[in-house]
Amino acid sequence: MQLPDLTEFMTWPWEKIAPYYAELEKQDLTAANVLDWLADWSRLSEYLYETYSRLHVATTVDTTDQKAQQRFGAFLENILPEARKAEQALAKKLVESGLEPEGFRIPLRNMRAEIELFREENLPLQVEEQKLRNAYDQIVGAQTVEWHYREYTVSQMRPFLQDPDRAVREEAWRLMTERQLKDRGPLTAIWQQMLDLRQQMAANADKPDYRAFRWQQMGRFDYTPDDCRAFHRAIEEVVVPAAAEILEKRRQRLGVETLRPWDLDVDPLGRPPLRPFRDVEELKAKTEAIFQHVDPTLAGYYHTMRQENLLDLDNRKGKAPGGYCTDFPASKRPFIFMNAVGVHDDVQTMLHESGHAFHAFESFALPYIHQREVPMEFAEVASMSMELLASPYLTREYGGFYTPQEAARARIEHLERSILFWPYMAVVDAFQHWVYEHPEEAHDPAECDRIWGQLWDRFMPVTDWRGLEDAKVSGWMRKLHIFKYPFYYVEYGLAQLGAVQVWANALEDQAGAVAAYRQALALGGTVTLPELYATAGAKFAMDAATLRQAVDLMLRVIADLEPIANAD
């Protein structure tokens, strides 16, 4: 199959793409030709996915770019639904052939699930859902405040939450939150439309509810909703008490009667905030130096991204919120997007998203795009492990950002936040289970507020929200995953448990742990989720015992780092 230059392909209407799919569909599949057929299908899919990815990236780097929005919208409406139908036809052809090429055990399993779920009438609904995601980005991306006669995005206000002056922190927090609350009306409208679309998609696919639909869509073959509930209980048993101890230590060090929401990011000992870099060029250079010590090959991947302008890191007005790594499969390159404002969280995000990028680079060696579809529960192991594997090299001794005292402080902050994250993850995940078990009630934002508040009190009991109840219970509206990526959050909790196990191995043998990590990344999606974890040197688990081992290790390392961080 002879495809044009990718730049030309990206401008094509569906009428010019369709004959390539038709040519593949009319071929008779045999053991002798299936690999060539797969190679042609894979290349065509790579072109299509890269077109989607590049058009989507353009809408996030500048949400005010109307031409980019129109190009992406036209692709979503006119090309993507037809392409999905064509892709389904080819998947069905391969499944019905009875052929199983080497390395296709898991991809074929996934195709069977997708075929069973596919309904043509859902294609326009998926287009509408994507439009609503874009509308969410535009609303949140436009949120700005005036702070001391200057305009800031809400993200750019984050450093003020680290100010040692409690009055400054409170003023900044209230300003940010009040601005976010002003968008409750338009966000509610988006939310209700999303719920209706998702329920309709589930009904069209003959599923009892959207959760069942989404479970199959996400390829969750290795655990169930009941397993998630067991994970929530394990977190409540093991992590919530540990988190409460961390927060109580923070309260005592700050010398305050109760911890308020604006007390959670400031250094509890009154030290000035960590300011790891002045601009994104420094962030890039020092991150690459750190990766040289983790693994030279990984550092080489990062250097390629720097050289080829595959990093969009600075925060600016009109840019979509959050951070992500996507990939351009035809070009065999990943792309990292984030909103850096000069705080330590940006370093963590950079390391995290780089882990995703390394995953892409390692799996690009697999011959077919279908083998590179990695379950998110392991994709996040790639990113979260990199945060921990890189942590010993944060100091300037290794070309990094910090003095030994600052690096110890940064590592403590990371480990403490990782422990504090598990309860928050449980809130988000449990909330989503409730939403899709009770979609009619979830249509009412007041009911969503009530349930979110209950879950918050169950898993996050320490911080004092008196007088701030409206901000507390509406927290679900500020979690983009709930709007844009339903049920995509428990992955972070599962993967963090896997990542701590990879890190535990690295504390004994850094080179061996990194080699196992890379070996697992290179498998892409060719083996099961438990097999991926095992290859990386971890156990896929959701139980209290495994969680307790991880938390105990994290607390021990925090205790070891405290004297270094607090040294004069």
Image (cartoon, helix red, strand yellow):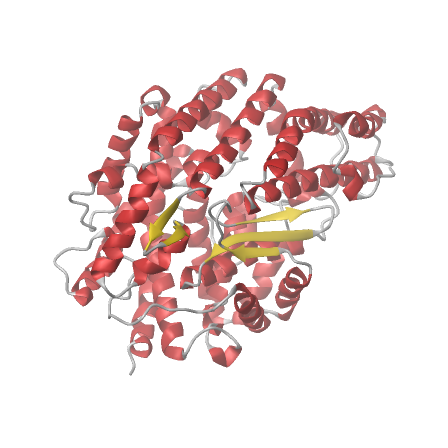
Residue displayed at 49% across by 52% down = 316
Q: Quadrant of residue 54?
A: top right
- Residue lying furthest left: 257
- Quadrant of the frame with the N terminus: top right
Q: For this rendering, which residue is in front, 374 or 406?
A: 406
Give coordinates of residue 177: x percent, y percent: 30, 44
Give coordinates of residue 191: x percent, y percent: 41, 28
Give coordinates of residue 136: x percent, y percent: 46, 35
Q: For this rendering, which residue is in front, 114 or 184?
A: 184
Residue displayed at 70% across by 46% down = 329
Q: Quadrant of residue 128?
A: top right
Q: For this rendering, which residue is in front, 178 or 150?
A: 150
Horizontal side, residue 554 vs residue 384: left or right: left
Residue displayed at 26% across by 50% down = 240
Residue displayed at 54% across by 19% down = 205
- Residue lying furthest front: 149
Above or below for 415 versus 231:
below
Give coordinates of residue 65: x percent, y percent: 58, 40
Horizontal side, residue 164 vs residue 389: left or right: left
Above or below for 365 versus 347:
above
- Residue 216 visible in the displayed image: yes
- Residue 545 visible in the displayed image: no
